[in-house]
Image (cartoon, rainbow, N blue to C red):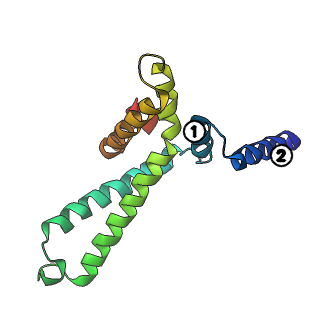
Amino acid sequence: MGDLIDRRRARRAALGGSGSRDPVKQYLAEIGQVPLLSREEEFELSELIEKGTIASRILAEIDAPESCPLIDEAEIARLRADKAAGDEAFDTMCRANLRLVVSIAKRYSGRGMALLDLVQEGNLGLMRAVEKFDRHKGFKFSTYAT
């Protein structure tokens, strides 16, 4: 079993170095490297995204955070950290679900749009779904997004 995995890795490495690779296959190989998320990980990431969104809204409402007397520097630093963590969680959630987009896009290929165009449109939909995902409803993200 380990020998088969080693041969696949060697073949993948050889193809990756040639430069003559099909862009679709290259994209699929790249997104295949990102691990899928468990329900618990989706919940945690969704929570971080929500906190980051709230922090982003608060920071946007404050014109000059340093000159606002109601919020001290420590609170501003916490808000910035929450926003950064939310942005990172958003990216992680999107990257972990790119295979879902490809699987759905494949169902619609051959209907007038190229697969890469379908994937691009699907990625926009994925980002919107990550923004709107409500973890409190109890669904896995893949169920919600489709």
Mark 2: few/some/many CA within 10 Å (<14, 14-19, 20+): few
The type of residue carrying mark 2 is Asp
From this view, report whether residue 108 is shown above or below residue 59. above
Q: Identify the residue at image location x=20%, y=68%.
A: 59
Q: Horizontally, is 119 left or right of 18 in the view?
A: left
Disc 1 secondary structure class: helix
Q: Identify the residue at image location x=65%, y=40%.
A: 21
- The residue pinned by badge 1 equals 23
Disc 2 secondary structure class: helix
Residue 146 found in image quarter: top left
- The residue pinned by badge 2 equals 6
Between disc 1 and disc 2, whose residue precedes? 2
Q: Quadrant of the N terminus?
A: top right
From this view, report whether residue 99 is shown above or below residue 112. below
In the rendered image, residue 116, in percent from the top left (x then y), is placed at 47, 33
Of the two numbered discs 1 and 2 in the rendering, the one whose residue sits closer to the viewer: 1
Q: Identify the residue at image location x=48%, y=21%.
A: 109
Residue 44 appears in the picture as rendered: no
Residue 29 found in image quarter: top right
Q: Tell me the number on the disc at residue 13.
A: none
